[in-house]
Amino acid sequence: MVRRQQAADRALRPKLRSPGHPRYQRHVEAAFWTEIAKGLLAEEAAAVIGVAPAVATRWFRQCGGMRPFDSKPPSGRYLSFSEREEIALLRAQGKGVREIAREVGRHPGTISRELRRNAATRSGKLDYRASVAQWKADIAARRPKAAKLVANPRLHAYVQERRSGQITTSGGMPIAGPVTGSWTGRNKPHRKDRAWVQAWSPEQIANRIKLDFPDDESMRISHEAIYQALYIQGRGALKRELILCLRTGRAPRAPRARSRRKTWAHVTPEALISERPAEAEDRAVPGHWEGDLIIGLERSAIGTVVERSTRFTMLVHLPREEGYGTIPRTKNGPALAGYGAISMKKALANTMSMLPEQSTRSLTWDRGKEMSAHTQFRVETGTAPSASTWTSGSTCPCPRWCPDRAVQPTKPPAWRPDAS
């Protein structure tokens, strides 16, 4: 009878892998995702809750940038980490099972099973430690619930085919889709590398599958389940490389609040559009310019400056810097494409210096990083730069390049040279 009971105890099973650092409690992870929902980066949220930046980054990437569903507080049915710490302290003091149960407020059978099942066995005997007990309890609480795309091969093939952009003829012959770039696992790809021209979005798949299989309830899946299969580590349903086929091509998901972050520290208060001269509003006085940067494929770019009164337009030539195409691209490396802050400042200064002094009163630009050197530009040319304060999520009758509007259009109309 004793041997049968010992064989049933998890503590006497074969050795498990090393638990490493004790897992953080649930409320710590919940606090981390609360800070992420506010728009903070993983490193910034780590500083707020007091964990290592590497741990916070791992949480963010393993969950695909989305808060896990099991963020609810524990119901109290199972022992918590604080209760396990109390049990460990009382056990170290030599207290018995029933005395520990009275102190903790649990049934003696619960304490007895906890001391046997989740005890540490590395020392060759049953030593109860709260961190090891919590680690073993978390492993036992995992459920082997397979994702729908894993359990249903037919559904998996349907989603995989449309997510990868594979198209077949009426006779079943596959048609090769666009060639994608190599998957690096972190940065989102260039536009020319995205296979979204022929690939279906998760929303399109989730709605179309109902029409293709109207009588088969097993062929049903939500768009969120497809996103989780792509982003959340451990799902193992869809290939991670299919992220390249998404419209955005993001490696992790970006919280909505992060899109509203004001990270444009290079825009000083005196350069805001609200500080622009009042004479520039009615377009009566010439000499006030509006600029924008146009980026094309292969990282090509050109700048435009338009005079507000006469609509006179000048193009800013942005040649490649020396070493472009030969020096390997590195993160935070030199900007060699021709539209970095220094390159943009030099090219714009050369273009504006060809104009008379009375014709360069002010220049309005957006908040792009290419104008980070606007202070040096003002010193060299004497032109007062101002940055527009655009916000997303609103509509405006102005075209996309108009920088003196208060909001950014969600769907800009066709460009017209005489529009404002």
Image (cartoon, rainbow, N blue to C red):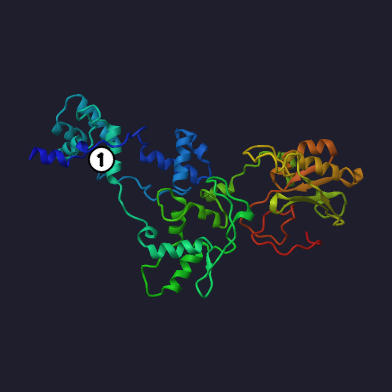
When asked about the image quadrant of residue 374, the answer is: top right
What element does badge 1 sit on? loop
Please provide percent x and percent y for residue 393. 61, 56
- The residue lying at 10 percent from left, 38 percent from top is 3
Residue 109 pos. (x, y %): 15, 40
> In the depicted view, which residue is nearer to us: 142 or 402?
142
User: Quadrant of the image for the C terminus?
Assistant: bottom right
Q: Which residue is mark 1?
A: 79
Q: Position of residue 280 (x, y in %)?
A: 82, 50
Going by the numbered disc 1, the residue's amino acid type is: Leu
Task: State the residue lying farthest toward the top.
Answer: 93
64 over 416 or under it: above or below: above
Report the front residue among 94 and 20. 20
Within-10-Å neighbours for mark 1: few <14, some 14–19, many 20+: some
State the image quarter where residue 386 is shown.
top right
Q: Position of residue 177 (x, y in %)?
A: 57, 62
Q: Quadrant of residue 226?
A: bottom left
Q: Is residue 393 above or below residue 172?
A: above
Residue drawn at x 16%, y 37% as measured from the top left = 112
Image quarter (top left, top right, bottom left or bottom right) of the N terminus: top left
Q: Is 225 placed left or right of 103 in the picture?
A: right
The tally of labels here is 1
Q: Is residue 66 left or right of residue 284?
A: left
Question: Residue at coordinates 19% horizontally, 34% vertically from top-left?
Answer: 115
Q: From where the camera sits, is residue 111 visible?
A: yes
Does 415 sit left or right of 62 as displayed? right
- Point out the residue furthest to the left here: 1
Let me know if residue 80 appears in the view. no
**Depicted 277 relative to depicted 284: above or below:** above
